[in-house]
Amino acid sequence: MADGNIGLWTVPLAVLGGAIRVSTPFLFVSLGECITERSGRINLGLEGTLVMGAMSAYGISYLSGSPWLGVLAAGLTGALLGALHAGICSLPRVNDVAVGISLMLFGTGLAFFLGKPLIEPTAARLPAIDFGWWSDVPQVRAALRINVLFLIGVALAPILFWAFKTTRWGLLIRTAGESADAARAMGHSVLAIRLRATMAGGFLAGIGGSFLSLFYPGSWNEGLSSGQGITAVALVIFARWDPMLCLWASLAFGGAAALGPALQSVGVTSGYHLFNAAPYILTLLIMIITCSPKRTLSGAPAELSITR
Amino acid sequence: MIGEDPTPAGAFGVEAIAMTMRFGAFTALDNVELKVRPGSFHALLGENGAGKSTLVKCIMGYYRPTEGDVLIAERERAISNPKDAHAFGLGMVYQHFTLVPAMTVAENLVLARDDVPAVVNWAKEKQELEAFLSRMPFRVPLDAKVSDISAGERQKCEILKQLYLKRRFLILDEPTSVLTPAEADEVLGMLRKMVEAGELTILMITHKFREVMAFADEVTILRRGKLAGRGKVSELTPDDMARMMIGAEQLTVQPSRTGEAGKIRLEVEKLVARDDAGGLAVQDLSLTVRAGEIVGIAGVSGNGQRQLVEVLAGQREAESGAVRVSGAPYSASREEMRRHKMSLLPEEPLKNACVGGMSVADNIALREFDRAPFASGGWWLNKSAFRKDATSKINRYKIKTRTPDTPISALSGGNVQRAVLARELGHDVEVLIAANPCFGLDFAAVAQIHAEIMAARNRGAAVLLVSEDLDELLELSDRLVVMFHGQLVYETRAGEADLTEIGRHMAGH
């Protein structure tokens, strides 16, 4: 078996490895969006934030030689874009969905513009921890080369779950998201709460982007993101605004995204593009199954513009 | 608040002196004086738009009055925002709940504090809350989600929240509008006891004379932003207060009830409907309304009345069951409504019966706009016919609007409802469905709407009247049914109705 010929086992193994690798950006963006949406605002611009994060992480990592500085830069870029979104949305009669779409285009466009000189050079990449040392099957070892960011993301989900329940900030974010009137009656500034929640969401989405350029696929080009940012927004709805469910949903999407390449590697080439579309088909299916014209979504923050 | 003396212990009084509040050219409050004695239960009466809310919002620091001062415990105080008012021990319970529905009662209480700890130790907080509740006259389930408890319990929560925050001067804005009479008496009775014990002072905004007579010591009455009268409740009658509230305005006289109920017009059979969250809102509901009869549906809001009306209005699909009008199946299509001469007065008329941005004339023509005389050939609209019809209806229904072309959203609530009334009752009516038709309207509009509904009944219309106002139901209905958890649980002739019996069924006992 040491020659790596494990037959059809390749597929589930590759899906598992893919679930871990591909899910990380989903996980960060969806957790970030979860924070933002729980405060009562939708930030559709996270796709742009993700790409900007990927670009700035790659650039800073290349210039400084430290990938972790790149991750930090990606987070800060994301927070900045979040602040921009929140700032525009705090003006009267501004729709957060429309602002989000324009910021999505702005973010990707700006990233392509600023990132032009970064396509050629190679930046320092994020390290991975080898959890597959016990096996001598190369596929297993490849699947279990896990990036630290993934572990941080996995830890973040229960932390957020706990924080929404038991911390002052968690309660305030939920109040702003469930009833802006109640928050105002208590003397809190809803706009300030949403500003911080949107910035936190942008920070996490930016980090999700840094994973794309610094680990997997691990380079900067214009086709880096294939809509992970926007898929993650849908994923939050599917996960019913619950950070723990965001984690499982991200893994499921990551696994679905790895299905196409895995099947190709064992020689299933017909319908390759169809299998590559698995995450999008999954998105559509989930939306069709979970949405109904007859009722509103349970668990949806009452102040979201889609539920009001 | 540094450097300011704290408010003395025990109940204290609040006075507003020469309060004037202008919003641009509009004067909402004109030199109003309000004096609430320490340890008293004070009622603030007035019609919608009389300036009651503006006055208390000035006291609470939501608005900065154009002129005037606030005295707390006989000392002039600067209150520039609600936080200042809270620091002086003033608290307000709003008409609309300020609890967060998706959170538990305990979370809501802790959240309301100014000093929410960064990390909440729930075990310790729950213990302290239990200890606090044991000292209170009423209890609420701490671990229940607010969305799962009844309106009465929510109102208790709101009041408990203020007491938990150690507020000693409570302003209650129409606190009983969502409660059954029994719940209202319970809550107000307990507050009254706390006032008598010298722990609290209460200022209650209301329009219910019954509650003023039963619970208040003193009353201040506002009319159109001015002080219209005040005095000890024991020296006033409801008639005195009503006169001060409405002034010299002439009210429409309601025609007397004539004629007997005829054959069945509206028939609802085993109707099942769901609410927006997918829960069962209307369960196996059967009901008949005859020609020349008003059937009133009583119930605390949220027991499926809204969904029932939405099904009849075509705004919601029924899960199962049947609706028949004059024996024919009815699915709320425009053709059927026209054929059966159906009319609808839904609640929140601006939202449910009008297009806010369109003119009064367009809204009045909304049902017939593509038919003669408003249109030729079903597509060419004749705007002068719109205006002519609207002008005559504006005069007949006393709609106060600048022109027929004014957007209807610019009108006051009473005039929006008058415009809907003109559209829905300006022709022959065989079936009328009305839901809270007078909610939030002034005396004159209420009298006019009641008169129109009674007149429609006398002309032989079958009327289904859904209302949260028991007085209105008792006044208008021939037959009264009580709706609870989506089902009809009690039926009585309105003439023989017993208020306590109805209240008991409204609460589900």
Image (cartoon, grey):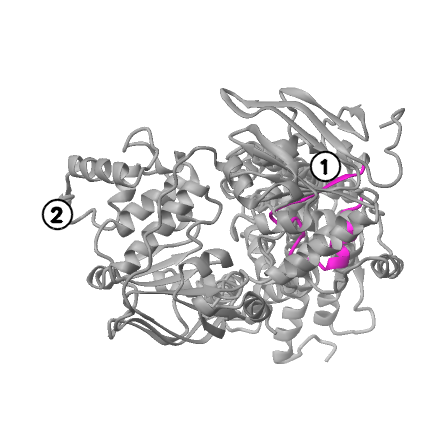
Select label 2 or label 1 by which is in front: 2
**Which residue appears at 56% of the width and 49% of the height?**
A304
Indicate the chain on which mark 1 is placed: A
Please give the label number shown on residue B372: 2
Q: Does the image show residue A78?
A: no
Q: Give, as a three-letter code, the residue at label 1.
A: Ile
Kindly report the distance in space between the C-alpha atoms of the residues bearing marks 2 and 1. 72 Å
Q: Does the image show residue A184?
A: yes
Q: Quadrant of the N terminus of chain B?
A: top right
Residue B72 drawn in magenta: no
Indicate the chain on which mark 2 is placed: B
Q: Which residues are magenta?
A: B89-113
- Relative side of B487 to A300, left or right: left
Residue B95 drawn in magenta: yes
Disc 2 vs disc 1: Cβ atoms closer than 8 Å?
A: no
Query: Residue B409 at what x, y percent from top left?
Result: 39, 37
Camera-nearest residue between A65 and B476: B476
**Circle 2 residues within 10 Å: few <14, some 14–19, many ≥20:** some
* Kind of element beneath mark 1: helix
Please give the label number shown on residue B506: none
Residue B382, quarter of the rendered image: top left
* Kind of element beneath mark 2: loop
Query: Residue B201 at what x, y percent from top left?
Result: 77, 42
Tag 2 and tag 1 share a subunit: no
**Circle 1 residues within 10 Å: few <14, some 14–19, many ≥20:** many
Q: Quadrant of the C terminus of chain B?
A: bottom right
Camera-nearest residue between B421 and A84: B421
Q: Give, as a three-letter code, the residue at label 2.
A: Ala
Camera-nearest residue between B38 and A67: B38
Please give the label number shown on residue A60: 1
Q: Residue furthest front?
A: B235
